[in-house]
Image: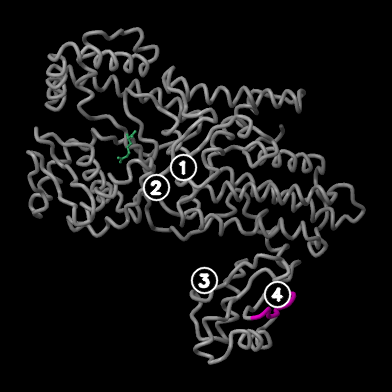
Amino acid sequence: MDYKKIIAELLNKEIDLDLETIEKLIEIPPKPELGDYAFPCFQLAKTFRKAPNMIAEELIVKLNKDGFEKIINVGPYVNFFVDKSVFTKNAIKKILKEGDEYGSSNIGEGKTICVEYSSPNIAKPFHVGHLFTTAIGNSLYKLFKKEGYEVQGLNHLGDWGTQFGKLISAYKRWGNEEALEENAINELLRIYVKFHEEAEKNEALEDEARAYFKALEDRDEEATALWKRFRDLSLKEFERIYDIFNVKFDSYAGEAFYNDKMDEVVRELKDKGLLVESNGAQVVMLDEYNMPPCIVLKADGASIYATRDLAAAIYRKKTYNFYKSIYVVGLPQSLHFKQVFKVLELAGHEWAKDCIHVGFGTVKSATGKMSTRKGEMILLDELINEAIEKSLEVINEKNPKLENKEEVAKKIGIGSILFTYLKNSREKDIIFDWKEILSFDGETGPYVQYSYARANSILDRAGEIKGEADYSKLTSKEEFELVKTLESFENQIHLATEKLEPSVITRYAIQVAKDFNKFYNSHSVLNLEDEELKIARINLVKSTCQVIKNALALLGIEVVEKM
Ligand code: ARG
């Protein structure tokens, strides 16, 4: 039931504004005393040549009140009170009928969205910041799918650059085969650090590394085989993390993939007269736009990070013909993306406006910046293990007899991490604080999961239902507030994709849990004489479970039936 549409159609018969404009003007009043929807009449004052409150007064007489309990005016607003029993019945029936599909829409039909996320660097640790982009991107992916878009999840691996020359040189000098097999990233990090230490004493090393990178660029067999090995082994490690969080990609085309696609970009920029020389490098000047020049070719003729991004953007447009192309990358790279998008625009690609950088803040622990002493790889594993362990502790305390505790702890622990990442607007920094993350009564993953399990246990006890519900008996404030929240799910999804903010859904999940707990704390569900009311309440609980499950799924979090 889209009440905004219904109200817009009603008003449209009486006033000279189109449906879309009216729909946009309709507000949700801040207090229930002001109804469920309100239409402000300010905009009509000119055409009607009357004061807004007089217009509102006249409108309420003319409007057809079917499906509404009442329509009144409060000052310059027309306030709509929907017929609660009709609303409740429609909402619950829709949720139960659509099940896992509830919340879906088809506004994205026929359009493709590229979402690039995660994009870690080969031979480097996957750090807590990479988990941030992974969590956001994974959620945006699911949100767009829910709106009917075709979505491409892209992992733009950092698998090219001069550092690979250093790695090859270091590996040939100090590499340890066994250590590489056992923990590739640790070993590659070790020799990379060693390379820099040694290079300070021995200048020839840098030349050697340059030569290896050149060999790599020239597709030398040995260099390529080593590069591929480093890449495969690193990817295996990343995939271990993706498996833990159940994250998938449609493509792992990383920076190296664009090697043979950059000449064309450079030629295009040259032909369009955009390239100029600056200290030997080829750059696109952007001072007119208050930005430093975008370097396309270094003085030695080598391409760089930005060149690969230009090639990647063009490739994505050609390959996917995207409607939007999204880059989930930390805020420190804002300028880089502004430059890249500007260069694309200057080169005449009108679709540059459809490229969007979705930035996010940094991650800190409650005691200061996350320590990197032991290497951030360990830190990420530590984070995961600690979340699971601590969840297990809580379960042991709350429900020691629970079956498959380990599995439940894993879902709660992983969920609590994702929830923490996605709880606030993405541009805010995150402060990891275990007490808060795993608390069962704060605005946390475990709180929402616990509410789900609590609701689910009511359904378990209810057993099979026979008979019909009478939704007109769900008359309390708590019931109606919960129903309204459940009904607004699809709207919340649209809001989340419009703002590119998974936190809209995280907040929403918290709201559903809060509304449910308020309802359940003041109304009994199973202990009722009135069978019609009982079934109506059971169905309300069932709907709540379904919506929490669907909302958490959009964040990449799985529910647990019992905890
Ligand atoms: N690999 C980079 C890093 O870890 C992020 C890549 C971002 N994506 C892009 N298209 N430039 O910092």
Question: What SS does tag 3 mark?
Answer: helix
Q: Which residue is mark 2?
A: 358
The answer as to whether callout 4 falls within 8 Å of ligand 1 is no
Query: Could you tell me if the residues under marks 2 and 1 are in contact, i.e. CB atoms within 8 Å?
Result: yes
Instruction: Write the residue at 20% across / 15% down.
Output: 200
Q: Is residue 70 magenta?
A: yes
Q: Which residue is mark 4?
A: 67
Instruction: Write the residue at 46% across / 61% down.
Output: 107
Determine the CA span between mark 3 and mark 4.
21 Å
Quadrant showing the C terminus = top right
Determine the CA span between mark 4 and mark 1.
40 Å
Predominant secondary structure, magenta span? strand
User: What is the number of the mark on residue 24?
Assistant: 3
Say what amino acid the circle numbered 2 marks. Answer: Val
Quadrant of res 220: top left
Q: Select label 4 or label 2 by which is in front.
A: 2
